[in-house]
Image (spheres, helix red, strand yellow):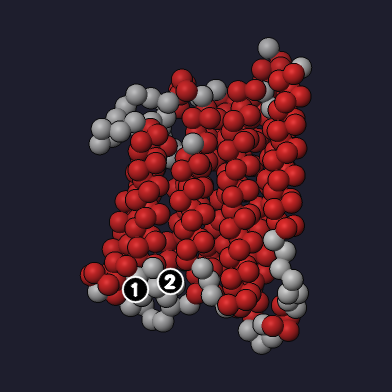
């Protein structure tokens, strides 16, 4: 009883913290987007997606924390990770919206600060959901599941930032640096897929045969997000002004549209399918 009460109190405190933090950072400037972006539909769409991004991420945070106590104790870590991912994203989206509204810039820095925290957390969904017994001892480049996922995330996000910030361009030439960031970042993405597997196969770090039947659908859904849902990000990268890929002039609004849609689909969707699996597994435990 004490543990359950503590868990509920913690959930409520986290929800209250996010709510107060966002409320405390409300800008004094009230923007009428219809007037500010009159005749510029792409800029209006960009503003709209930043706004919807932080509202939807914040709502998802509240939902996941509220649902945390409705699943069995062994799946509550999964719900906490889901809440952390969207909660962190809600903060960053709020500030990205502010930068765009006040300065007219799509912030590369805030975007990658969000990803460097949330992408490794997304990879941690697997062991927290499927259980430690389904995580294998197989090694890839001398690393186990966690090492592969974290290294892959750092490579993917690190080279993506160096490409978009123009750092690689200064060293290798603008176009070559941009392509290097995209390709090397893709290597990190491939490493995560190697560890987690695909919807059609086990990964180096995950054994499908040891995943409970009621959780296998959710595990495969998470893989769909990684293998297919994450494709939206390199498509957005093609429009990055900082990467300067030589495909024409970059467009920061198109870049933001692709990234914002990808984040809402993947981060919220990741949490929803994990919650569905945890609920099914909890029901199966209760029926035993």
Give how far across and how far down residue 167 sits, in percent.
Answer: 32, 67
Give how far across and how far down residue 236 sits, in percent.
Answer: 47, 66
Would residue 32 appear left or right of 196 to someone viewing this image? right
Instruction: Identify residue for label 2.
Output: 240
Residue drawn where x is 42% and y is 75% of the image: 241
Q: Quadrant of the N terminus?
A: top right
Q: Secondary structure at mark 1?
A: loop
Q: Secondary structure at mark 2?
A: loop
Would residue 103 appear left or right of 202 to someone viewing this image? right
Question: Does any portion of residue 267 appear in the rendered image?
Answer: yes
Which is more N-terminal, label 1 or label 2? Answer: 2
Instruction: Identify residue for label 1.
Output: 245
Residue drawn where x is 58% and y is 71% of the image: 99
Q: Quadrant of the C terminus?
A: top right
C-alpha span from label 2 to label 1:
8 Å
Give how far across and how far down residue 135 sits, in percent.
Answer: 42, 26
Q: How many marks?
A: 2
Mark 2 and mark 1 in contact? Answer it, CB < 8 Å. yes
Q: Residues within 10 Å of mark 1 (few under 14, many from 20)?
A: many
* For residue 194, above or below residue 49: above
Question: Does any portion of residue 176 appear in the rendered image?
Answer: no
Query: Residue 51 or 126: which is nearer the viewer?
Result: 51
Query: Residue 122 or 30: which is nearer the viewer?
Result: 30
């Amino acid at each position: 009883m004490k543990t359950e009460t503590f868990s509920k109190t913690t959930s409520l405190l986290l929800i209250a913290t996010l709510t107060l933090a966002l409320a405390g950072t409300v800008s004094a400037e009230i923007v009428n987007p219809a007037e500010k972006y009159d005749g510029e539909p792409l800029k209006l769409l960009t503003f709209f997606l930043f706004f919807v991004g932080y509202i939807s991420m914040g709502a998802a945070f509240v939902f996941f924390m509220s649902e945390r106590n409705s699943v069995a104790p062994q799946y509550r870590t999964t719900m906490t990770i889901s809440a952390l991912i969207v909660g962190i994203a809600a903060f960053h989206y709020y500030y990205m919206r502010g930068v765009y509204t006040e300065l007219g810039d799509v912030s590369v820095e805030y975007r990658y600060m969000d990803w460097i925290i949330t992408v490794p957390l997304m990879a941690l969904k697997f062991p927290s959901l499927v259980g430690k017994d389904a995580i294998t001892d197989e090694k890839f480049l001398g690393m186990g599941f966690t090492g592969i996922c974290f290294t892959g995330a750092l490579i993917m996000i690190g080279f993506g930032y160096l490409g978009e910030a123009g750092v690689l361009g200064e060293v290798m030439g603008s176009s070559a640096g941009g392509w290097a960031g995209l390709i090397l970042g893709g290597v990190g993405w491939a490493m995560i897929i190697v560890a987690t597997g695909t919807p059609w196969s086990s990964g180096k770090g995950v054994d499908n045969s040891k995943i409970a039947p009621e959780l296998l659908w959710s595990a495969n859904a998470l893989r769909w997000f990684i293998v297919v849902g994450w494709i939206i990000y390199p498509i957005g990268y093609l429009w990055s002004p900082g990467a300067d890929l030589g495909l024409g002039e970059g467009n920061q609004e198109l870049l933001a549209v692709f990234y914002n849609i990808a984040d809402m689909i993947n981060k919220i969707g990741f949490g929803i399918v994990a919650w569905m699996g945890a609920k099914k597994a909890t029901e199966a435990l209760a029926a035993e």
